[in-house]
Image: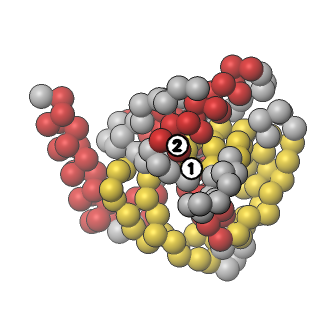
Amino acid sequence: MTIKPLIILPDPLLRQISKPIERVDADLQRLADDMLETMYDAPGIGLAAIQIGVSRRMLVIDVSREGEEKQPQVFINPEIVTSSDERSVYEEGCLSIPDYYAEVERPAVVSVKYLDRNGKEQTVEADGLLATCLQHEIDHLNGVLFIDYISRLKREMVIKKFTKAAKSKAL
């Protein structure tokens, strides 16, 4: 397993729509393992393939709490099939937007259809942190970032800050 470098805002890759995965094979399973290793190292609770520069519709999640046994999950070609009218608000962060957090309101419950790491079709009914995390990571696959849910002024300030940081790193 290899820890991959993370793509950081304002990299335009983060706005790219990821391509569906045609088949689940050993290479894809290796990518899932690399993604989990990268996510745990960061540390984070979710990671979309595009965040390591791979434009494929796959994400990994582990919402187990500190001290609990790890519960890694792999979602290939995930798709939200239903979402509740009931809403919930969580303070979200993102490995591609380090050290920035904001409250985001999303559907409280979602049903997600996906392929597991063995290529078997699954459906999960998720609420709480898992529902939020799934929506956040699926957004990544569609080129959407959590900062797209905050006010335009705050979003522009965040983008400006990260653009300035990227320019000073390039010098």
Indicate the position of residue 126 as horizontal and vertical percent values.
74, 64
Looking at the image, can residue 144 be seen?
A: no
- The secondary structure type at the circle numbered 1 is strand
When asked about the image quadrant of residue 147, the answer is: bottom left
Q: What residue type is labelled 2?
A: Met
Which scheme is used to colour this image of the protein? Answer: secondary structure
Indicate the position of residue 75 as horizontal and vertical percent values.
71, 43
Picture residue at 53% right of the left edge, 75% below the top? 89
Q: In the rendered image, which quarter contains the C terminus?
A: top left
Picture residue at 65% right of the left edge, 33% below the top? 32
Is the Cβ of the residue at disc 2 closer than 8 Å to that at disc 1?
A: yes
Disc 2 target residue = 39
User: Horizontal placement of 82 versus 14: left or right?
Assistant: right
User: Horizontal placement of 153 versus 28: left or right?
Assistant: left
Q: In the rendered image, which quarter contains the N terminus?
A: top right
Q: Which amino acid does label 1 sit on?
A: Gly
Looking at the image, can residue 122 be seen?
A: yes
Picture residue at 59% right of the left edge, 60% below the top? 67
Q: Is residue 82 above or below residue 28?
A: below
Picture residue at 80% right of the left edge, 50% below the top? 113
Disc 1 target residue = 46
Q: Distance between the residues labelled 2 and 1?
A: 7 Å
User: Horizontal placement of 151 versus 77: left or right?
Assistant: left
User: Horizontal placement of 49 versus 147: left or right?
Assistant: right
Which-is-in-front pick, marks 2 and 1?
A: 2
Please tell me how crowded label 2 is: few (under 14), some (14-19), or many (20+) other residues with Cα within 10 Å: many
When asked about the image quadrant of residue 107, the answer is: bottom right
- Residue ranking furthest to the bottom: 86
Return the residue nearer the eye: 153 or 99.
99
